[in-house]
Amino acid sequence: MVVNLGDLTVSILAASLTLTMPILYASVGEVYAERSGVLNMSIEGIMTLAALVSLWVTYSTGSYLDGIVAAVLAAAAVGVLHSLVTVRIGINQLIAGLLIYSLAGAIADFGYGLLTQKTFPIIHPIRPVYIGGLSNLPVVGPILFSQNVLVYASFAVALVLGLVLYKTTWGLKVRAVGENPEAADAAGINVNLVRHLCVILGAILAGVGGASLVVGYLGLYNSGDTLVAGRGWIAIVVVIFARWSPYKAIAGSWLFGLGYAIAAVFIGSNIFSSLGPGTGYFLLAIPYIFAIVFIIVFHRGTKPPSSLTVPYKRK
Amino acid sequence: MLSQLRSGNYLSYLLGILASLFLFSVILLAFGYQPLPNLEGLATGSFGSVFLASETFVLMSPLLLAALAFLVPFRARFYNIGVEGQIYVGALATYLAASQLGGFPSVAAIPIVVVAAALGGTLWLALPLVMRIKLNVNEIFPTLVMNFVAIDLVNWLTAGPIKAPGSANLETPFLPTSTWLPVIPGTPLDLGVFIAIVAAIAVYFIVYRTVLGFEIRASGANPRAAKGGGVDVSRSILAVGLISGSLAGLAGMVVVAGQEHLLAQNFSPGYGYNGISVSALGAFHPLGSTVAAVLYSALWIGGEGLQRGFEAVPIQLVFALQAIIVLSVLVVQRLFEERRSRGR
């Protein structure tokens, strides 16, 4: 088989932006949660639950918007649970996050079981937006100007939430609460209220990320965490890589989107089948090997928000 | 003081579990299932016969080993979220060693397999461990990410290089029978169950009865004070890392050599992650985790019974119940702690 390397590169780059989308939503949300001092390890579970809900509702109503709204509500509910047990009660954030990840995943798979009793739900993902003549340009046309609206929105959300974090009073409050809650409290900021809101915002964005994977890419659900397939965990790694900045989360998410795209395109094209059966599985490890290398290379100078994982109690 | 603390703890378990069972009953009702017969089914499905009780203990062994693998480093404040991946590599090492030992008698083969599994698990923790000790990189994310690499590695090998020729399943050939862990005749109880229980007792002694254990706990309670008091915190972390990786490797070994007798793709239904929940339910204490592992696996085996039972309740509801129980117990414990510290 002769492979045209130019075409292959274009299709990898185009897929990389689509695959950036779910990770970007989730990682920008996690930036807010962690900036306020709360590590949310349940992102993967929230994305899974939101993915199922978006499929179910879009499939039954025919409306993408309904599907996304329902997914956001489900994700927000999980976020409320997480912020209650970690911020209000103050149990170990790592353990709470892992438990809520299991809980949300179990609920999603239970829901999928109920749904598939009657039907086998598949939807058409949202169509790409073709922007006039731009989409017909060689190379940049298919890469930049033939994505769907959820892809464009993910980049816009990251930019807007970057502005909010660095240029508004509310963003200042979020950063203050995560860096020095005692001082923030003394300045009249309601520390735990800010944290509740950031955790719920983070959960909502993870929900949009999970929904975008179904509505904006795959159009179906698989049980047993094979759909989100680690993107929620990757989003948490991206936050470190991005040094808790929504802007840098764009670059970090794209690098992992690229890793997923390389794996997907190579598996699809069977280039590696000559290396023996099963090699495709190992290509799936590419994004994770990326992640480990990044952590080793970029660990210097990464300093998490000072009060990350420390619950706040007024003296 | 101590007894007061303990009774508060038992009460929190009672309250947490009762609250969870109540919530579970409400969920069952909401989806049109009958709560009481299904709750009874959970109990009879896990302990209702010698066979079922044995199944419960067989499932307990990887869960308990995984829980121990998490709790030992947790006591030194080293968060090994990578138990799942270390289980996979321990299982892979089990297969690689056992498949070479066909001619050996069990007495020689099984110890070699045990050592290989422990080395495999430790190998998979080595990189995050070195990153933590030498580069001061937090271990949570490296250990987590290594899980996926391990699973993909086993997926690849069981689909290609070590796949059983001609098999329709993605799995290796059977291990030589001399490397199978022996069972108590007439039951499914294998040596793995005893290995897990002995490991729990050994961990108890190491953590609570040795100088190393004291240093581990001191490093976890207050690293700066421990350092000031002459404890080598890096050495404690290295020690807990080696113990943890070995225990995780053993968890993979008891499944492969004790239960399935081959290495299959996705053989672990999340033993590593569930082990973290079990250790949290067991208050990060080796003996508490033993009880927690029995409870956890009883729910699991009972849940499988419900799924086959008269109303075919999906097991995902029982998985949700497991998470709800641990969350509720942790919440109640935390509330009690707060009341105690306010009452002082």
Image (tube, grey):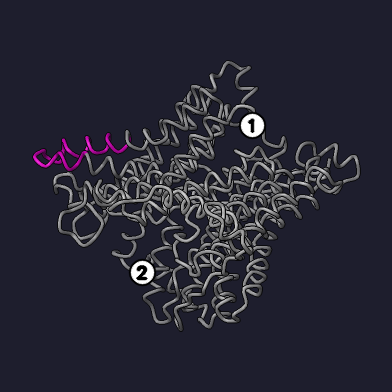
Which residue: 86% across, 42% down? A185
Q: Residue furthest left?
A: B103
Q: Is residue A23 magenta?
A: no
Tag 1, which chain?
A
Which quadrant would residue A302 be assigned to in this image?
Answer: top right
Tag 2, which chain?
B
Overall secondary structure of the magenta section: helix
Which amino acid, by three-letter code, is at mark 2?
Gly
Q: In what quadrant of the picture does the C terminus of chain A appear?
A: top right
Which residue: 34% across, 62% down? B53
Could you classify mark 2 by the number of other residues whose Cα lies within 10 Å: few (under 14), some (14-19), or many (20 or more)? few
Q: Can I make out residue B247 in this image?
A: yes
What is the x, y in percent for residue B177? 14, 49
Q: Which mark is residue B324?
A: none
Number of marks in picture: 2
Which residues, given as a range, are shown in magenta? B97-118
Which residue: 58% across, 27% down? B218
Where disc 2 sits, the SS reads loop
The answer to whether A11 is drawn above or below residue B246 in the figure is below
Which amino acid, by three-letter code, is at mark 1?
Thr
Which quadrant would residue B45 be assigned to in this image?
Answer: bottom left
The answer to whether B225 is drawn above or below residue A219 in the figure is above
Q: Which mark is residue B48?
A: 2
Q: Is residue B102 magenta?
A: yes
What is the x, y in percent for residue A203? 66, 57
Looking at the picture, do discs 2 and 1 lie on one chain?
no
Q: Distance between the residues labelled 2 and 1?
A: 54 Å
Q: Can I make out residue B292 in this image?
A: no
Where disc 1 sits, the SS reads loop
Which residue: 49% across, 52% down? A230
Nearer to us of marks 2 and 1 is: 1
Q: Residue A302 carries which label?
A: 1
